[in-house]
Amino acid sequence: MKFKIGDTIDNKQFGEGTILKIDGQFYVIKFLDSKYGIKKIHESCLVATSKQRALEYLRKALNDPSAEFRDGQFECIEKILQHKRILSVQRTGYGKSMIYFIATRLLRDQNKGPTLLISPLLSLMRNQITAAHNIGINAKSVNSTNTEDTYPILEDLKQNKIDLLIVSPERLNNDTFKQKFIPILSNIGLLVVDEAHCISDWGHDFRPDYKRITQLLNNMPSNIPVLATTATANKRVVEDIKKQIGSDLFIQRGSLVRSSLRLQNINLPQKAHRMAWLAQNIPLIKGSGIVYTLTQRDAEYVAKWLRFKGIEAKEYHADIDTKIKEQLETDLINNKIKVLVATVALGMGFDKSDLAFVIHFQRPASVVHYYQQVGRAGRGISEAYGILLHGKEDDEIAEYFLKKSFPPSFCIDQVLQILRHHNGLSITDMQQRINITKLMLEKTLKYLLVEDRSPILKYGYKYYLSVHANNYQYDVDSVNKIIEIRKKEQKQMQEYMNYKGCLMAFLQKALDDDSSQDCGKCSNCSETPLFSEVCNFDICNEATAFMKRNYHTIPPRKRMDGHIIPENEQAFDGRALCLWNDAGWGELVANGKYKFNNFDDELVDACVKMIGDWFNDASKPYPKWVTCIPSLSRPMLVPNFAERLAKKLNLPFIPCIKKIKQNKQQKQMENSCQQFLNVKDVFSIDTQNISQELLTQPCFLVDDVVDSRWTFTVVANMLMKVGCTGVYPLALAKNTTETE
C-alpha cells in the first residue's frame, strides 16, 4: 500500500498517526495530549507528489540527476494539472517546452487524453518530437510533408497510443483533419499554443490561421487546460491573447535578459563591406552559428560567398526541400558545418544549446523579430555573440514585407466581386480573371476564411460566397492601426541600431520587461568593441568582384496555356548577369535603362565573360546568331546592346522578332495567368532576313530585364516552331520578388 504526505493511517507496520515530512525525512507522528509518538517511514512507501514525479521526469529528460526547475516552470505545470489556462511569457531558451512535455507525461499518468500542440514551424516540430521522445512521450506530427503518415497516426490516436500530437495552425482547416482528427481530439488532456504571439493581430508574426485556435477553444469543454507560450509578447499582445483565450487567463512573465549574449551593432551600408566583414570575423569565433538574411536570394548569395572564402556554409530558406532542411539542421546541431545562412524559416523553436553566434546580415523589421532570432544563441554556454549588421537596403525590404502583411482593400473587393459573378472558382480560375499575385490571392482568401461570419466558404478546391457576404465589411481601420504599429516597430529598430546605452536593456524595455538593467557585456557596456568595425580593403574588393560574377539562372517554363510545352519547343536554361538594382552590375543596368537610355560597354564585356563561363564545358551546342526582344517604348535600347554583344562574340545579329502591338509592362502583371495573357499575341517572327541554314541553328535571345519569364517562353516557342533548334535566353538583370 502507498501513502501520501498528510494521510492519517492506522497500520500494523507503522502504527497510528499522520504522515509528515521533517528535514527531508518522512515520519508517522501520533499526537496525544502533550505527548507524541514518532516512527520513520521510508520514501518508497509513499506516493510521489506531483512535484516529485515532475522533477524525476525533468532529470530524465535532461539526463541530469541534479537538475532543478527554473523559477515558474513547476508553477505552470501545477496550474495545468488544476485545469487552468496559462500564458507563459519567458525568455528564449527558458525551457517553455519542458513545461508541456512534463505536464503531458503527468496527465497521461492520470489516464487523461493526449496533448494537442499547435506549432508554427516544421523545424520546430522536428525539434520538439526529438525532445519529447527523450522523456518517454510518443509524439507525432501531422503536416504537409508527411501526408502518407496521416492514416497510421489516426489509427494510433484511436487506440490511445499517441501522447502528443503536433499540428500547424493551417492543419486546423484541412478537410481530412477536421473530419477525421477533430472528433477524436475532443477528449484531449491539454491544448498547447506555442509561439502564442501569432494568435494576436498585434503580434509581430500574426498568422490568420491562428484565429482558428480561438474557434477551437470556443468549442472545447472549459475544464481542459490550455498553455500558451511565447518569448516575444509585449503588454499589448498579452492583452489581446487574454481576450482570445479567456479572461481567466493566468499570465506568467519572467525576465527576458539573456546573460550569455554579448551584443554589438555595426553599420555597414554596402553589401560588399558586410560580406567582407563576415569573411573576416566568422573564422575568429569558436563554434558554429547562424547568419540571418531578410530574403532567400541573399541567403543563397551570402552562403555562396562564404563557401568561396573557404567557410563551410549552407543556405536555408522556405523553398528548400524538407528533407534537405532536416539534414541542414542536424549538421548544424552536430557542428558539421560552420554556419547556416538562413531566413526566418529557421527561427522560432530551433534549439542548439551551444550555438556560438547569431549574425544578422540585415536589420530585422522589429525588436521582437530580432530578440526571437538572436535568442537562438547562447542557450547552454556561458558566452555567445549577437551581431547586428545594417545595410542601406534594410528599410526598403522591411517596407516591402509591410505592404504584403495584410491584403489591401482592393484585393478583398476584387475577390468578392468575382465570386458574385462566378460563384464557385478555384485559385487558378480567379487568377485568370483578376490581376493579383497568387501569394496575395491566397492571403486574401485565407484572411476572409478566418473572419468571424466569413463572407466566403471553401469546398474542395473551390470558393463560394457565404450567407454573410452581403453584410461583410473589411475592417480597414483596424488593419491600418496594425500597419502603423509595424511602422513604429521599424522606427524602434532603427533607434536600437544607433543606441549608445546597454543593448540588452533596450531589448528588454522594448518588450515591456520591467526588470531591465545594464548587462555589462554588450559592446556599449564594454570599453572596446567586441569585433572590429573596419573591413579589410582587399577582401572588400574581392567581394565586389564576386558579386559581379554571381550570375543567375533563368529556368525555362515547361507549361503554357494549360499544356505541357514539348521539349523540342522549350527554351534552354538561360542566364541573367545580375539582379535588378543590386550591388555588382545591378545599379549600372538600372541607370542604363532609366537614366541614360543606353547600356554601358562595360556590361557588354561582362556578358561576354558570363557567356564564356556558361559554355566553358562545351557540352551544349553553342549559338550561331543573336536576336533580341523588341520594345515599342524604347525601340533602340535592347537592339543596340544586342548588336554590340553579337559583334564582340563574332556572331551575326538578326532582329527577326517584331512587336506587333503594345502591351503593359510584365512587372505590372501580378500573376502567371495575367503575365501569359499579356504577351500571348504580341510578337511575330520575320524570317525574310535570315537564311534557312542560320535559322535552324541555336541562338541567343537577348532582353534587358526578365520578370516573369513569359516573354522568353512565348518568343522561344515561336522561334523553335519556325525551325530554330535551340534558344538561350540572356538578360542583363533578373527582377525578383523578395521572399522569406
Image (spheres, rainbow, N blue to C red):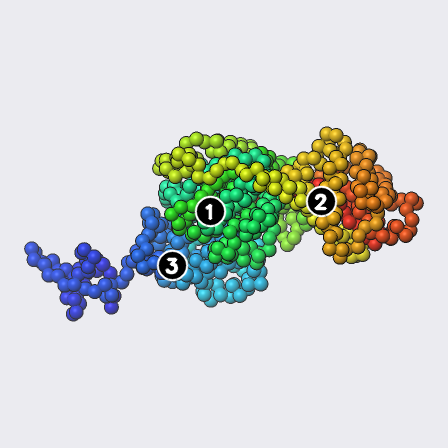
Amino acid tagged 2: Ala
**What distance separates the C-alpha of mark 2 from that of mark 1?**
36 Å
* Residue 285 marker: 1
Apparent side of residue 469 relative to residue 130 in the rendered image (left or right): right
Front residue of this view, candidates 167 and 532: 532
Circle 2 crowding by C-alpha within 10 Å: few under 14, some 14–19, many from 20: many
Circle 3 crowding by C-alpha within 10 Å: few under 14, some 14–19, many from 20: many
**What distance separates the C-alpha of mark 2 from that of mark 3?**
52 Å
Place of residue 354 in the rendered image (x, y in percent of width and height, measured from the top left):
43, 51
| Res 478 → quadrant | top right
Label whose residue precedes the other's in the sequence (2 or 3): 3
Farthest residue, direction top: 595
Disc 2 and disc 1 in contact, CB within 8 angstroms? no
Label 1 SS = loop
Task: Identify the residue position indicated by label 2 in the image.
Answer: 576
Amino acid tagged 3: Ala
Apparent side of residue 273 relative to residue 464 in the rendered image (left or right): left
Label 2 SS = strand
